[in-house]
Amino acid sequence: MLWAIRTKPTERRESKLSRLSYALLVPPGFYLLFARRVPIHWLNAQVLPDVAWVREAAVALTAAGLLFAIWARLYLGTNWSGTVTVKVGHELVRSGPYRWVRHPIYSGLLMASLGTAAERGEVRGLIAIAFIYAGFWMKLRTEERFMADVFGSKYAEYKRDTGALIPRVIRGGRDNTHS
């Protein structure tokens, strides 16, 4: 929240209905990840072995994801917003983690969520990831429309060169926003 204080003023903001479309998906995902137990018992069923190496790998994945998201947030600087906006004097950031993916904050948070789900090792972790992914995907599609409106061909080129959430191995080529 402190980082939000030092951002540029907003020029354009998504509608409340647009925000609601993804805001209804992410909180249930986080609830499933972080609740001690959920009342639907089969969701608490163990699907990964409860062994040290799985827990250690899961914690490492969570930490790596959080660090990546924080790095991306710091790199975005005053262009950041918790909702989909265009800032006054908005810049197209293509360096740092943004040289690999267009939405590295979401990439990092998804990686951290995947690590948390693996550490839990329960069915609900898989469902949580699906909810969180769906919410982030809906939000990033709105962001992509905003950025295309503002930056036009520069954003189209950026989309060709990077993945949305996962880095592209092959640069250029067809416009595939499902990466």
Image (cartoon, rainbow, N blue to C red):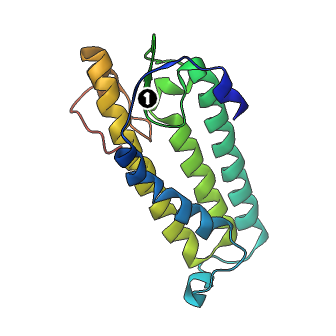
| 168 or 176: nearer the viewer | 176
Q: Nearer the viewer, residue 161 or 23?
A: 23
Q: Residue furthest top?
A: 89
Q: Is residue 38 above or below residue 10?
A: below
Residue 120 place in picture, x, y as percent: 68, 71
Residue 52, percent across and down?
78, 69
Does residue 119 appear left or right of residue 146 in this picture? Answer: right
Q: Is residue 28 above or below residue 143?
A: below
- Assign the N terminus to one quadrant of the image: top right
Q: In percent of the image, x 57 and y 87: which residue is there? A: 40
Report the residue marked by disc 1: 85
Residue lying at the far right in this picture: please name it.
52
Q: Give the secondary structure at mark 1.
A: strand
- For the question of whether residue 171 can be seen, the reply is no
Kindly give the residue lying farthest to the front in the view shown.
16
Q: Is residue 57 above or below residue 42?
A: above
From where the camera sits, is residue 39 visible?
Answer: yes
Mark 1 closeness class: few <14, some 14–19, many ≥20 residues within 10 Å:
many
Q: Position of residue 18 (x, y in %)?
A: 35, 45
- Expressed as whole percent of the image width and height from the top left, the position of residue 65 reads 63, 45
The amino acid type of the residue labelled 1 equals Thr
Q: Looking at the image, is 101 positioned above or below residue 66?
A: above
* Residue shown at 34% from the left, 22% from the top: 158
Q: Quadrant of residue 38?
A: bottom right
Q: Is residue 170 left or right of residue 76?
A: left
Give the residue at x 24% y 16%.
Answer: 153
Please indicate whether residue 41 sits to the left or right of residue 131 in the image: right
Position of the C terminus, as image quadrant, is: top left
